[in-house]
Image: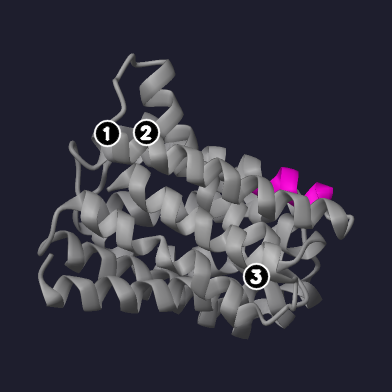
Amino acid sequence: MPLTAVLLVLASTILHAGWNARLHRGGDPEVVIALAYLFVGIVLLPTAVADPPGEVVGWVLASSLAQGLYMGLLGSSYRTGSLGVAYPISRGTAPLLVGLGGWLLLDETPSVATAVGLLVLVVGLLAVAGVGAQRAERRAVGLAAVTGLCTVAYSLVDANAVDLTGALGYLSLVMVLSSLGVLAVRRPSVARLRAGLGESVLVGLGQGGAYSLVLLAFQRAQAGQVAGLRQVSVVLGVLIAREALGPRAAWGAVAVAVGAALVVW
């Protein structure tokens, strides 16, 4: 893997862990994440005007629904739980489901690395979930796990859609529609919207910056290598949180990162 790609991915993981930590520390994560998505979607809107994804309207709606659920669940899990519990579970559930799905549903024989990764990933997730249970954060554990399921859903939809249309224009419409959907359901007051504006811009810049760096890395290295190295963000997120959850949470987060990297590599 070229050094430039490694540096791009590591910079992306720092931004990803950073915006999640910022979102968790805020007082209104459900509204802030929706506003952040809306901000990025509006910034990218000119690409949708120049190259409208009219041929994939169904995919746009499906991805918007999945990403809206993702936003709502992630925000709620951050409100009710520790970052060191919710973040590793939300990040680790997706590769677990992808690995198990390929094995059990598609009859794909897992490699030795994938099999070991699945085992390590399960151990790590159970360890982190156990910490959540001890801290009476079972609701956050459940919400974070379903967040991972939503990640798998919109990732599969997006992977098919971007083969048929411009990626940025498609992404813009998805982010605008999904965020507006979340705001319509939650119906926050004007005061809540104003209070979250500044923070949502910072979170949105972190989201957009992290994704842009990953796209650049994809141009320089294999997708599996990039996806595997991105799992470093799980450990960084726990370190940034500084929540003193104990050694079990620490080694659980490391196991989630290592296991997920082995599964997606």
Give the amino acid type for the residue marked by disc 2 in the picture: Trp
The answer to whether the residues at label 1 and label 2 have Cβ atoms under 8 Å apart is yes
Region of the chain picked out in magenta, as a range: 138-144
Q: Earlier in the sequence, mark 2 or mark 3?
A: 3
Question: In the picture, residue 231 is in which quadrant?
Answer: bottom left
Q: Residues within 10 Å of mark 3 (few under 14, many from 20)?
A: many
- C-alpha distance separating marks 1 and 2: 8 Å
Question: In the picture, residue 149 is in which quadrant?
Answer: top right
From the viewer's perspective, is residue 33 above or below residue 149? below
Considering every residue shown, the one lying at the far right of the view is 136
Residue beneath label 3, please? 32
Instruction: Examine the rendering and report whether any part of residue 184 can be seen.
Output: no
Residue beneath label 1, please? 160
Instruction: Give the x, y percent position of residue 259.
Output: 44, 49
- C-alpha distance separating marks 2 and 3: 25 Å
Kindly state the secondary structure of the residue where label 1 is placed. Answer: helix
Answer left or right for 18 relative to 219.
Answer: right
Quick one: 138 or 152, which is closer to the camera?
138
